[in-house]
Amino acid sequence: MRHLILLPLLTLSALAQQPKPAPTKLAPAITAALEAHPGLVYARYGQREMQLDLWKPKTTSQPLPAILCIHGGGWYKGERSNMANLAQALAAKGFVTATISYRLSGEAKFPAAMQDCKAAVRFLRANAAKFGINAKAIGVTGLSAGGHLAALLTTSGGVKELEGEGGHAEHSSAVQVGIAMGAQSDLESVRIGELSGKPDDPFYRTFLGDSQAAIPQTYALASPRHHLDKSDPPLLFLAGELDDASTHADDARADLVKLGIPTGLTLIPQAPHAFLGQQKAFDTCVSGSVDFFAKHLKR
């Protein structure tokens, strides 16, 4: 494993103030080879409809593994189109992929966002025959807040409080592999306790409802590391080399190793928190993600 240089800790607010990167580009041949299904309703809460965009290779002779892609934005902003390039790049490598909209913290507090993610997995399973999905091989990835949700989705299979009422309850919301990018994996840590304890914290208090000290049980429920057990699937962590060292998930990875669950850390050289906006970093991410997903979903 490569030697890790631990960088000074950055606050989430500092990361949020980084300039928005230029969009990455996909070769025209990639999008031309894909079949797109935009705006699919995957869950309903009264009159509220949750949508996803789905891509799959146009030519395939057998069901393919699926990958759910979850956008970031501090749990309070962002949209599914932010992950479209990654989803299409992965679909071109032989997967069915989907980007989802989920309820942001300004609309509904945790666990709403996680319940949406689980509803999306159940939707993919319920519609596996329609979209050529291998229902036994579904993975997840996400960046930043989306990386946290991806990690939590990976480790919280069977946690009833996180299932929600999004429909297709007869299907499992468990995934078979996860890749968390630029993600917080331990919401019970001292660092997050300190961040959430600040009265002007715009992230954790807004997402979870209060500080870690005030509602520790909620932070535990929202923490991917808290749910780790030997039944969990493989979970890889990706992070920009210039990002906060907390995204390396050292403690969570150590727990995974003790449990005998495949894991690892890939650092994207000279990349910031929002590394999907840099072409070289994006290409590196796609290559590493395809290798990990193929290893664990195409067996």
Image (cartoon, grey):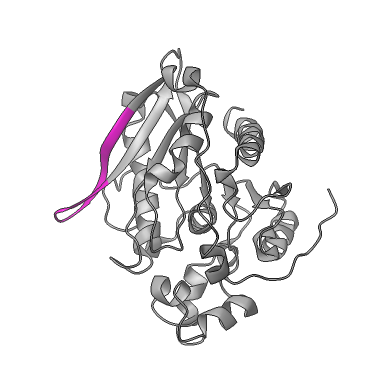
238 left or right of 207 in image? right
Q: Nearer the viewer, residue 295 or 83?
A: 83
112 left or right of 93 in image? left
Quadrant occupied by the C terminus: top right
Q: How many marks?
A: 0
Specify the segment rendered in magenta: 37-50
The answer to whether residue 42 is magenta is: yes
In the image, residue 175 above or below residue 78 = above
Q: Image quadrant of residue 282?
A: top right
Q: Nearer the viewer, residue 235 or 34?
A: 34
Whole-percent x, y for residue 108 in the image: 30, 67
Whole-percent x, y for residue 271 in the image: 67, 50
What residue appears at the point 43 percent right and 37 percent down from the top-left corner? 84
Please indicate, yes or no, whether residue 178 appears anywhere in the rendered image.
no
The answer to whether residue 51 is magenta is: no
Q: Please name the predominant secondary structure of the magenta segment in the image.
A: strand
In the image, residue 81 above or below residue 251 = above
In the image, residue 66 above or below residue 200 = above
In the image, residue 53 above or below residue 220 = above
Whole-percent x, y for residue 62 in the image: 46, 16
Q: Image quadrant of residue 186?
A: bottom right
Residue at the outermost left position: 47
127 left or right of 173 in image? left
Q: Image quadrant of residue 31?
A: top left
Q: Nearer the viewer, residue 143 or 94?
A: 143
Please indicate, yes or no, whether residue 167 appears anywhere in the rendered image.
yes
